[in-house]
Image: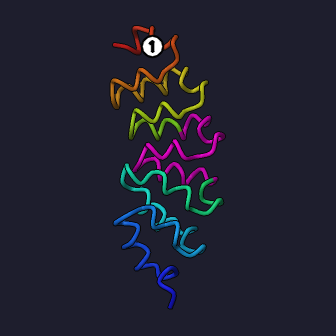
Amino acid sequence: ENPRADKDVVREAVKKDGAALEWASKELQSDEDIVLEAVKKKHNASSIQFASKELQEKKCFIVKALQQNGRLLQWVTMELRADKHVVKEAVKKDGTALTWASEDLRADSEVVAAAVTQVGYALQFASAELRADKDIVL
């Protein structure tokens, strides 16, 4: 059997290095559990680019992935970066993900508040108007 198509072999490989997903079979690049394992660690967020296009565009899957690694927002579609629910999930996990949100959402007080609650210095990624808003700053 081809090890690239063996779910157990690929799971162990992506646990060690999420980028190993690139070498997995197309079938396993479409497997939600395998891809979630690949992108679990912060430094492996970019591994989402090796997931199938279907998974990369599947909102409910991306939300699940963002709930474990907010930095993944950097690698999702522009459409998803402009989706308030998606971005809120990302910034609740990692406030610095605000930097990859759409311009409109960086000006959204609810999204920015969630990011700043997670990590105060995320404020630097908010719109100028919100950076000056004492309700957000405090």
Near mark 1 (Cα within 10 A), the count class, few <14, some 14-19 or many ≥20, is: some
Residue identified by numbered label 1: 131
Looking at this rendering, what residue extends furthest in the bottom direction? 1
Q: Element under label 1?
A: helix
Q: Is residue 106 above or below residue 4?
A: above
Q: Quadrant of the C terminus?
A: top left
The image's colouring method is rainbow
Apparent side of residue 119 relative to residue 3 in the rendered image (left or right):
left
Residue at image location 66% in from the left, 40% down from the top: 79
Residue at image location 40% in from the left, 37% down from the top: 92
Image coordinates for residue 25, horizontal then vertical, percent: 56, 76
Apparent side of residue 101 relative to residue 134 in the rendered image (left or right):
right
Q: Is residue 126 above or below residue 102?
A: above
Apparent side of residue 136 relative to residue 78 in the rendered image (left or right):
left
Q: How many marks?
A: 1
Residue in front for this viewpoint, 9 or 116: 9
Residue 65 is one of the magenta-drawn residues: yes
Residue at image location 42% in from the left, 21% down from the top: 124
Residue 62 is one of the magenta-drawn residues: yes
Q: Which residues are magenta?
A: 57-86
- Prevailing SS of the magenta stretch: helix
Image coordinates for residue 44, horizontal then vertical, percent: 41, 54
Residue at image location 42% in from the left, 23% down from the top: 113
Image coordinates for residue 8, horizontal then vertical, percent: 41, 79
Write down the quadrant of residue 11 in the picture. Answer: bottom left
Q: Amino acid at mark 1?
A: Arg
Image coordinates for residue 78, horizontal then vertical, percent: 64, 40
Q: Is residue 36 above or below residue 76?
A: below
Q: Is residue 34 above or below residue 105?
A: below
